[in-house]
């Protein structure tokens, strides 16, 4: 089976990181990204970019990494034991944005390529995590992703939307992390066809998110909304540290800890036995948005 060029994939991801960072700095209008170049003991390295203290973004990170080594970590071989002991290369861009305004949703995006010996695959996706739910925001996010998917296969969006709903679930809370999006992994086959799809959905990120951020960024809010935002960020932390495969892979493969944990918010809160008041916007988030739903 033809294998995609790791060099071409890497160049695409570096350019993707550049385009997204430039667009986010322009949208924020105040803060700029700090860049750290790092090397991984054992092979590879990355380019971490973090923004903080902005008008739109309280904290955000857009990371590029390319790591390789002689042996895969346990998180990568749990589902594929035949790859144990194989040399590997993993290259990707990962993004998490924590907005300042509680009405602007958190967003996560990750697109990656993995190869071990003759085995390779594409993975990735994007998902939206609001504190306050709006149907038009969820619909816009999903419609943008669906349009990108539909240009490459009619079954891509429904398959990867369902996969996202299942993956981004906080099992011990019995709720989804947010309103989902798309998620896929271990995607292999025709290299040219799949790479074209993978690049298009990655390129759709700015169109899927920035209109939502602009629509909500100036919505007035007070202490109640801010407190709920911190509670929702706490749930985000729970998922990332307990379930997220990318976090586990990064830490177990000897990646740069600061870059891996850039996904965590600057502030979060946990209140013992907290429940949203009945019939409140906070209660409606879980009731109306944190369960699988057809948004398009």
Image (spheres, rainbow, N blue to C red):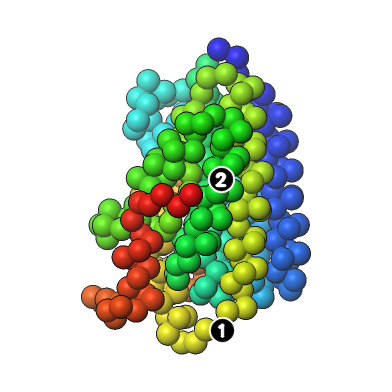
Residue with the mark numbered 1 = 220
Location of the N terminus (image quadrant): top right
Q: Tell which circle, 2 or 1, labels the residue nearer the N-terminal end.
A: 2
Q: Position of residue 227 (x, y in %)?
A: 42, 80
Residue at 71% x, 29% y: name it. Answer: 8
Asked if residue 18 is positioned above or below residue 129 in the image, the reply reads: above
> Tag 1, which secondary structure?
loop
Asked if residue 196 is positioned above or below residue 266 in the image, the reply reads: above
Q: Which label sits on residue 280? A: none
Q: Position of residue 49 (x, y in %)?
A: 66, 56
Q: Position of residue 50 (x, y in %)?
A: 64, 61
- Distance, label 2 to label 1, CA atoms, is 29 Å
Of residues 42 and 122, the one drawn nearer to the viewer in this rendering: 122
Residue at 49% x, 28% y: name it. Answer: 187
Residue at 61% x, 23% y: name it. Answer: 193
Of residues 24 and 73, the one drawn nearer to the viewer in this rendering: 24
């Amino acid at each position: 089976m033809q294998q995609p060029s790791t060099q071409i994939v890497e160049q695409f991801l570096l350019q993707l990181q550049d385009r997204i960072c430039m667009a986010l700095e322009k949208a924020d209008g105040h803060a700029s990204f700090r860049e750290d170049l790092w090397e991984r003991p054992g092979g590879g390295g990355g380019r971490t970019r973090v923004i903080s203290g902005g008008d739109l973004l309280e904290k955000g990170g857009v990371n590029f990494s390319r790591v390789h080594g002689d042996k895969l970590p346990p998180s990568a071989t749990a589902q594929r034991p035949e790859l144990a002991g194989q040399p590997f290369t993993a290259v990707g861009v990962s993004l998490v944005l924590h907005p300042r305004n509680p009405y602007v949703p958190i967003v996560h995006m990750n697109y990656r390529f993995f190869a071990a010996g003759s085995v390779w695959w594409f993975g990735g996706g994007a998902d939206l995590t609001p504190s306050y739910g709006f149907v038009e925001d969820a619909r816009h996010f999903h419609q943008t992703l669906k349009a990108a998917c539909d240009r490459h296969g009619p079954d891509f969006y429904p398959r990867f939307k369902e996969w996202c709903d299942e993956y981004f679930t906080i099992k011990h809370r019995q709720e989804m992390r947010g309103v989902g999006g798309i998620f896929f992994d271990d995607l292999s086959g025709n290299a040219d066809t799949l790479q074209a799809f993978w690049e298009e959905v990655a390129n759709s990120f700015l169109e899927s998110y920035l209109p939502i951020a602009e629509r909500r960024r100036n919505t007035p809010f007070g202490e109640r909304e801010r407190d709920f935002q911190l509670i929702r960020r706490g749930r985000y932390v729970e998922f990332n540290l307990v379930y997220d495969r990318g976090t586990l892979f990064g830490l177990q493969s000897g990646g740069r800890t600061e870059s891996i944990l850039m996904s965590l918010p600057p502030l979060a809160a946990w209140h013992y036995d907290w429940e949203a008041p009945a019939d409140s916007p906070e209660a409606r988030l879980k009731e109306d948005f944190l369960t699988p739903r057809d948004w398009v």
